[in-house]
Structure formats: structure tokens, C-alpha cells
Amino acid sequence: MRRLLFAAALLAACGGKPSVPEGTPIVIISIDTLRADHLPAYGYKGVETPAIDRLRKDGILFEKAYSPTPLTFPAHSSLLTGTLPGVHGVRDNVGYRLDSQRLPFLPRILKDRGYATGGAVSAYVLQGKGGLDAGFDLYEDSVEFRTNAGLGGMQRPGSETLNLSLDWLRSVKDKPFFFFFHIYEPHTPYSPPEPFASRYPSRYDGEIAAADKIVGDLLSALEGFEVYDEALIVLLSDHGEGLGDHGEEEHGVLLYNEAIQVPLLVKLPGEQRSGSTVSKPAQLTDVMPTVLSLLGLPVPENLKGTSLLNLEEAPARRIYSETFYPRLHFGWSELASLTDGKNHYIEGPDPELYDLASDPGEKRNILQGERRVYAEMRQELQGYDRRLAAPSAVDEEARQAMIALGYIGSAGGDLSGPLPDPKSRIGSLADLKAAFQHSSRKEHEQAAAAYRRVLAANPQMVDAWEFLGHSLKNLGRTDEALEAYREGLRISDGSPSIAVSAASLFFDLGRLDEAASHALMAAPTHPSFAHGLLAQIALRKKDLEGAEKEARLAMDDENLRLGPMITLAEVLHARRSYEEALEVTARASDVYERREAKDPDLIRGLALIRGKVLADLGDTPGAEAAFVQEIRMFPEDVRAYSNLAILYALSGRPGRVGPTLRQMVQSSPTPGAYAEAVKTLRALKDPESAAALLQYALGKYPGSSELRELAKYSGT
């Protein structure tokens, strides 16, 4: 029936405007961080993109399309609600929640009209718990949370996301369906797979080629399901990438064209208007009214956008963009901009105006010579809601804890007085990147010094406080690390990522109540981490029932995430549910083996807990093999060494205890490793060796509060 309607609609469209039949399949493909001017469809020669070129041939290309903000979560919130950030309220990738129930939300509207709705995303910042999963039958977002990885590092290959979607697509191919498909290539870190890594000198272009391959696989799947020809397919990006054009390597801080201009292609059913081009400016908020208009559905009155198919006849307009990222993360001024495709006005402490026709690279600020245009655009910009609500995606219990801890009251939203223009401080990002490089090379002293230099010039830079804390923690200067985390939390009104780091450190130090308070602060944004740590805290407190409850909450709706599985196995081991614990570890191993990108860090602790279970079951060889496997994969992680040393002692091999602990402190020369070795020797009733090692460790790390606590306990 749908194909008969499809043929009839095509006949009707031959003499008029584009039309689609009732139940037309709708596919939105979002390629994160993709600059329009790095695609052959827009004239670029540096990369080959046959799949995107096919959509260009079969569809309509919009020459000048813009994002409302160069940030992933806010931009996609605008895409799916048809509203600007001032309306939907999402101003950053973390700390905000999309209230999709009070807004027009495309997936819900289509679901209410009988559509099957599916979404699949490749970035942690698009997790459904942020509000994006409302109205979706399927929302595949099982991207792993990892501490200290940074939000950009929490991603998965788009090919894996596609493979997880194919069964659902197959199940709905004969029904009306809406599919929202997001891939994170070419977002940093640029790591294109072969053959693209060798083919392209630019790693960014290599990732674009990899993204195109994934798009091609999706289009082939749609063809195989016999829905490509009759589908409405929209391909776009949420924002671009700086690539150093104005001093910014990535995105989020500045609003030049390289950050906000995006590709936009629309393929209508049956090759309607195929190969055509629209030159009038478009915006991501136009996508929703386009879909609704084509389906003959009412367009909500409060939408700012218009149907992309009516742009040529529509009145001239200017497109709005904004970024509060510099304010929220660095203590710099926010920016806003308007463009009509010819002129681009950027408002900040030092405003700018560019003539894009004569100066597409935006190198010559013509504001002084074009005062009339400047005044007109500045006046229009005043009509947009740019009031900033501080990040507050927490429940009331967590909020009260944050107030008690002194973290609420001085957030980026409350910064007063003149703030620096981001472009005047953009060089600090190079200093921050240099500090990151020290951190990646584990040069923690140099990294800490570099972060302090950055903070001397930018004391409100939340990200620098966070990473300074990481470096100090790795140096064993835990008190200083906690102070850095506290300052970052105070400035940011409780940054969820810093709350994660602080909670983990408090837990390592045995300060369980403080660890729990900080885990609660992180829970709305990082629920699997928070419930997982609360499970570990309950284990430490011998509350096995509470531990299992929290572990299963960490697993809720996240069956493909490995971290919660490992935590649940630990809880089951503590409850002596050995067979069930082994089943969970086997399931986690199976999930990991099916991953395309096998990041070993995702299974940190898996062999360790399996070894503990096997040791308790009396399988000494199996336990030993598991502990050795954990050590081989994670030589800097101390837990497997201590368990292996105890296993050697209990199995009549005391001569192997000392070498195992020595290997531990050599592989991880930190106060924590020495503390673990001391505690292991005490557990094995060897107080003399424990005392000697503790004395040596205190001489090596006199500032370690953990070692000092051990000394108090022993009377040293």
C-alpha cells in the first residue's frame, strides 16, 4: 500500500510542489563536527565522499546552512525541537536537561501519528537520559562512561552504532518509520581507520572519509530494505570544527563560519528536485517544520524555522547562533551572532562584522566602515533570549548537598563584571593543549605546572582546575588535588565531570560519605558511574543489599555497558552468589568481544573480579591466570597484584609475594601503590616488612595523606 501511495504522490508532484505520501520513511543522518567546506559537494578536493555525493546527486543541497550553537547536545536539541537554545534551555553538553515533554519534539509527534521511532547515537553527550530519548521506541545510546576520558573521548565507532540499529530497521521497513542516526566521526581525537588513515594526510579528512563509508553502508541497508527511493533523507552536521583557522583547533569557543556553517542535504522521495541547489540561508531549526509540512502535519506556531522547500520564496532573514561555552568553562564572555549569508555579525566585548562575499575566511573586520549594517544587526540581536540559566540538572537532594559543600553560588551564569573576549584569550587554549600533552605522556609534574600557568591568567577556567586535580592526584598530592576539584566545582556550580573525579578520589581515600555526596552530584548526568560508585561504597560498608540495589540501578536500561556489569559482578561476589557472578563476567566478555572498537580500558577489573570468584571457589590455577591477565592488561592498576600476592601466600608460595608487590610499585610508582603493598603485607601478618616499606614510602612521598594515615594506624 505504501508503494502505491508513493507512486501516486510522485505523479501529483510532477506538476507542482514536492510531495510525500502518508507514512513516508524519514531518516535524519547527523555527522558530528563536519565542516561544509571539507566536502566535495561544497567544492572541496581533499577527500572522496561517494555516499554523500550520491545524496547530493539525488537531493537538494543548501549552500549556506548554519547551526544555532557549536555544541553537540544543544545543537541536536534544536534540531529535534525546532527551537533555539533560548527556548529549549540546553546551553552546554553537560549540566542541562532537555524537557522534551513541554516542547514540540519531532520523535514524539511522529510516534503519535503512528510512526515507529528509532534513534542511535555514537556520543555519550547524546545519552537518552538527558531528555533526548522521549518519543523513541528504540534509543540506542550504550556508549561507555569512562573517568578522566573527557566528554569527547566517550564515543564509539559509527559502524558499531549502525550495526546495533540494523535489526530494528529490518523490523520496521514495511511500516512508517523515523530513524535518527548520529555518528561521531570526525570528532576528536582524529583516528581514522585504514585504508583512510594512509590515504589522507589530514587525519580530519581521513575521518570524514570513514564517516562517508558508514553513511554508504546505511544507504545500502535502506536499499536492501527497499525503502531508499521512497524515503525522505536529511543529512547534516551539528556544527563545524576550527582547525586553527582563528586560533581554535576544535569548537565551542568561537562563532566564525568554520564552527557554525554545516552541510545540509535533503533527498526527497522519487528524486524530486534532485541535483538542485538553494542559496538562501538555512538553519538546523528548519528541519522539523520541513518534515511536518511535507507530511501535511501542523507546524507548531512557536517554531522560528520554516520549511526548507519554501526558502526561495520566503522573506529574507538572518540566522542566529550563540555559544555560552567560553563563559561556562573558561570565565570568558559568551558570544552571539547573526548572518544573512552575506554579512556575519559576531557580538562580544569586541564586536566583529564580516563581508562573507569578499572575505569568506573572515579575516577583515569591517565594522567601523559599515556602521549602519552593524547597528541594524546589533538591534536585531537584542530580540533573542540570551539569559543564561546556570547548569542545574540535579535533583533537590543533590542540590542541597552542593549548597552545604559550598559549590553553588558562583557559577558561570553568575559571573559579573566585564569578561574577556574569547578571541583575546584564545592563545590560552594552546597552553591548555600543551598541558594536556604533558598529561598524556604521564609527565605529571610538568602538567601540573602548565595548568597552574594557565590558571594564573584564567582563574575561572573550570577545565584547567579539573585537569590540574588529575595531575596532582597522579603525583600523590591528594589534598592539593581535592582543593583543585573543589575550586572547579565552586566555579562551575558543581560540574558533573569534576564531581566524578572528586567522588572517585574520596572513595580511594576511604572518605565514603564525601564520595557518596559527590556521586549524587554527578548522578543526573552520569547515572551509571554514580550508581556504580554508590554500590562500591555500600560494599565497603558491608551493606550488601544496598550494594546490589545500586549495582542494578547502574545496569538500568544500559545492558550493553560494561562498567555496570563489572560492578554487579563484584557485588554478586561479595554476596557469595558465585555462579551468577561468573555468568555476569561471561556476559561482559561476550559483549566486549562483539565490540568493533575494543578499548581494553572498558574491561578494567573484569579479569580481577573473575579471579576473586575463582579463588573463593578453590580454583587456584584459574584465579592465578585471571589475576595475571588483569596485570598484563593494566600493569599500573594495583588491585590485581595484591590479590595475586595473597593467592600465592595462601597456596603455599610465600616466596612469590615479595616479587609480586615489588612489581606492583615498579609498575605504578605512586603513594597508592605503596599503600596497597603495606596493607597487603599487614593482611599477610608480616608487620616488619610492612613497617619497613611504609617508612621507605613516607620518605619518598612525604605529602601523601594516605600513607600518613597508615602510619597513624601502625603507630609509626
Image: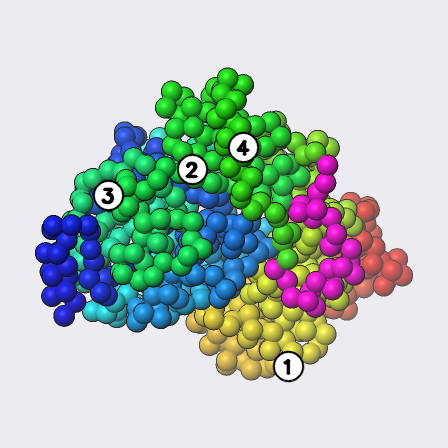
Residue 132 image position (x, y, % from top left) = 46, 61
Q: Quadrant of the C terminus?
A: bottom right
Q: Toward which corner of the image does residue 569 lie, by quadrant?
A: bottom right
Residue 676 image position (x, y, % from top left) = 71, 59
Instruction: Please state if 523 lies on the left or on the right of 689 as rendered.
Output: left
Tag 3: residue type?
Ile
In 3D space, how far apart are the residues under numbered discs 4 and 3 (Cα atoms)? Answer: 32 Å
209 relative to 649, above or below: above
Q: Residue furthest top?
A: 369
Q: Which residue is mark 2?
A: 318
Instruction: Kindly state the secondary structure of the residue where label 1 is placed.
Output: helix
At label 2, counting other C-alpha atoms closer than 10 Å, the crowd grade (few under 14, some 14-19, many 20 or more) is: some
Tag 4: residue type?
Arg
Query: Which label lies toward us, 2 or 1?
Result: 2
Instruction: Kindly state the secondary structure of the residue where label 3 is placed.
Output: strand
Residue shown at 38%/61% (left/top)?
A: 106
Marks 1 and 3, the one that precedes in the sequence: 3
In 3D space, how far apart are the residues under numbered discs 1 and 3 (Cα atoms)? Answer: 58 Å
Instruction: Please state if 684 lies on the left or on the right of 565 as rendered.
Output: right
Task: Check whether the beta carbons of the residues at disc 2 and disc 1 lie within 8 A of each other.
Answer: no
Residue 620 in the magenta stretch? The answer is: no
In 3D space, how far apart are the residues under numbered discs 2 and 1 (Cα atoms)? Answer: 58 Å
Task: Check whether the beta carbons of the residues at disc 4 and disc 2 lie within 8 A of each other.
Answer: no
Tag 2: residue type?
Arg
At label 3, counting other C-alpha atoms closer than 10 Å, the crowd grade (few under 14, some 14-19, many 20 or more) is: many
Residue shown at 39%/28% (left/top)?
A: 342
Q: Which residue is mark 1?
A: 545
| Residue 228 visible at all | no
